[in-house]
Amino acid sequence: MREGSEPLLEIHDLVVRYGVATALDGVDISVRRAEMVALVGPNGAGKTTLLDTVSGLVAAAAGRIQLRGRLAQVPEGRRLFPEMTVEDNLRLGAWRVRDRRVDPVYELFPHLAELRRRKAGSLSCGEQQMVAVGRALMGQPDLLAVDELSLGLAPQVVDMLAAHLQDLNRRSGMAILLVEQNARLALDICSRAYVIEAGRIALTGPSEQLRRSPEVQAAYLGGAYEE
Amino acid sequence: MSLFLQYLAAGIATGSTFALVATGFVVIYRVTGVINFAQGVFAVLGGFLAYSLLHAGVAHGLAEGLAVAVTAAIGLAFGLVALGRRGTPPLASLIVTLGLAIFSYAVVITIWGDNPISYEGLSGLLAVGGVSMQRQYVLIVAAAVATFLALALFFGRTYLGMALTACSSDQRAARLMGIDVWRMGLLAFAVGGALGGLAGVLLTPLQPVEFDSDVGIAVNGFAAAIFGGLVRPATAFAGGLVLGVAEAMVAGYFRSSYETAIALAVMLGLMLWQASRRGPTEE
Amino acid sequence: MAPSARRRRVVVAAALAVSLALPPLLAPDWQSLYVFVGLYAIVTCGLSLLMGFAGQVSLGQAAFYAIGAYAAAIPAVHGVPSVLGLFTGPVVAAAIAAAIGVPLLRLRGHYLAFGTLAFQLIVLTFIAEAGDLTGGDIGLRGIPPLGIGGVEAVTPLAYAYVTWIAVAAVFLVTGNLVRSRPGRALRALATSESAAAAAGVPVAAYKVRVFALSAAYAGLAGAIYAFFLSYIAPGSFPILLSIQFLVMAAVGGLGAVWGSLVGAAVVTLLVQLLQEIGSLPGMPTQIPAVLSYAVYALVLIVVMLLLPSGIVPALTARAARRRRDDVAPTEATAGDDARASRLSSVL
Ligand SMILES: Nc1ncnc2c1ncn2[C@@H]1O[C@H](COP(=O)(O)OP(=O)(O)O)[C@@H](O)[C@H]1O
Ligand SMILES: [Mg+2]
């Protein structure tokens, strides 16, 4: 909203290595407050590595990361604690903050209130993704990073979750960094996007502009069957 | 028949101490991925500490409680060394725990010498339905069961316990929540130390301990823990009981020199049977 | 590439020459120590192969050491020429390993660690109880020395050279195996069993063969041990010995053939040194035990925390890093080009 203010997340010239292999090679990214930004690219491009580095799970070899607020990540593959109930999963999301009340999440996803006593491992994929998003929200983030929102989910479920994310962004001004292989979806709901390939930012710009770019059309929008 | 019941009672009692040691293995392994081969040391140290406290005039109950508290602290210290710098691989940590076990021999010999010690536990017999059994047996089983239930509540119901469970279930996800997996590993070592120490203070009145008794205790505890794949506390607990009863029966009806070998052979047979049932994917 | 191979050859030649020249220069006590370092290196080499290449753990390797010792000693005590023990020891150990390996190696990881540990305790119980055959708990006495024709090995010096030959043979076999095609398949096995299986490696059969080979090594070392000491008992083969083999393998470095020699030498010499210091005149009676436990433990802990992959891999990695630094710039350029071409092909 406040366009002129300092970005919430600023990544400058980031390099990350796994042993001798370079996963990220001079990446620059920024996300402003209340912005929805997409990060698209093929498998193995380094998207998850980027989020993990910002979350502090992976150490950077070089570069600078500045985060002016709290970050929560919805990990790839959801990664709930399957033996625990939905409610306990949500409560653990609040480890960093004092407030462990789960009601706000149930207001957002009323369906989860019905499942609160169920073991997370017994839920459907769509329900699990809801819990994963809810768990991340329990950390009261200023920036929500979602890794592969649509992975393995039915289209209607993806649309529902995407609508919820847009709603969150609009109502509470929470910034969202959306990692997606489904570029069409990502460009539809985000205002800006980065295209990452082999550890480098290949293209960046407003979604409108990228959607019209011939390279992006050929590589990512050429047909759903290519995904 | 009554002889059988007496063997059964003795087996369940020693099996309960195996179960406590086994649960310690499981708690530490689940959170850290380390098989703590110093697990038997906690029991030995618990026994020696309680022995000294009792001789210093500390009352029963309090002495054992203090000994368990100290073994918990020792567990924490062992964890600090074994987990090393963040990112030390589990095999290196495992060998470090062996080193800690051997180091404890030096400490025990320096402080207490190399003779076995023991002390009086609960004395007297308790008659239950025609079978008389030592009160100490009843105490052991009661303490083990109470501890197990308390642990289940801790891991399942408290926020801290849930965080520990989260670390054992999915370290990556736990770290994303901001849970410090390394610190949780230290906590797990402390819990493991307390469990081993409790087994030691309960077992010492039945079987004298000396500085290197930890090997036998750890082998039995490990056998029970592996029964539950090192990750299922309830199965490990049951494994401890099975092992204790099997050993008591072999010793009672057959020869006591065979007790460990036959009990281990039974465990091994069960494991191989499980592995063969898992089918051709194991080939 | 070539200079490093040449450097390697020089190191190996120097090691051969020094180890051949050394025994006559040593006092008899140190000659015995030389024998033990060699025997432990043989066992550790097998264990290192099993763990580093086949990815399987054994906490019961001393069981095969014991089986080899008894399989060599029992016929010799009954008048069979003792040199045959050098065959019966490893062969019986390998045969038993192959037989129990078929079911046992279906167990994985920690289960296998437990299975091998249990196996050793069962073997020890059997030896202790089968008194007629094995001498029981008291042990087997009067084992004749190793001999062929009229020549008998009685002095530590003779056993030092017997051990030298055994170590050389074991290292030669292991080195060839590691470099062979099956050796490469084995390495795949250690990294990922399912990937190896998918690539057509007969995983189960390979695991059993490596297990049997490691048992044969332990059996050979056990046989020499029995003839050297002329007395063996179940107490000579405690669980702690198996653990010590594991420690030697880890200290030297898993999967490194020379690591087994380094690990065996470091640990054996350390234990010996500590015993010597502890038994100096004027030391209280408990000092030898306390000192050797404490220092042994501390060295173990420090080595594993500082060099978690073992001594030899740490050294070779450092050498490799130095070499790589020399050529780093060209490599980086090549990498950039590869990335650039990949990028253009995607866009
Ligand atoms: N833990 C790891 N160890 C080694 N290499 C890794 C690891 N995680 C990812 N990589 C490699 O880093 C690159 C980027 O992976 P990742 O960030 O998962 O890509 P993406 O999320 O875009 O699919 C890939 O080549 C992958 O193989
Ligand atoms: Mg990814």
Image: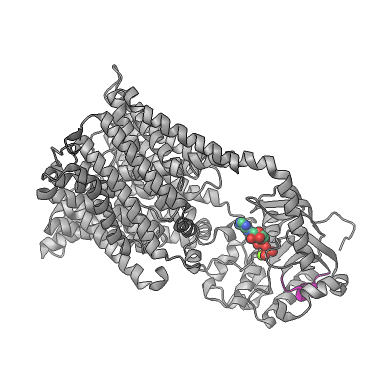
Range of residues picked out in magenta: A181-191
Where residue B42 appears, as percent x and y from the top left, is 36, 44
Where residue B138 appears, as percent x and y from the top left, is 24, 56
The front one of A181 and B252 is A181
Name the quadrant of the N terminus of chain C.
top right
Assess whether residue C270 is covered by the magenta stretch: no
Assess whether residue A189 is covered by the magenta stretch: yes
Applied colour scheme: one colour
Classify residue C321 as left or right of residue C38. Answer: right
The front one of C214 and C276 is C214
The front one of B278 and B240 is B278
Q: Which residue lies furthest to the bottom in this view?
A: A156
C275 versus C213 height, above or below? above
Classify residue A115 by image quadrant: bottom right
C214 versus A148 height, above or below? above
The reply to whether residue C62 is in sight is: no
Classify residue C39 as left or right of residue A63. Answer: left
Q: Residue furthest top?
A: C282
> Residue drawn 26% across and 24% down?
C285
Classify residue A73 by image quadrant: bottom right
C78 versus B151 height, above or below? above
> Residue drawn 9% across and 49% down?
C132
User: In terms of image quarters, where does ligand 2 lie?
Assistant: bottom right
Name the quadrant of the C terminus of chain C.
bottom right
Q: Which residue lies furthest to the right in this view?
A: A4
Where residue C274 appears, as percent x and y from the top left, is 35, 27
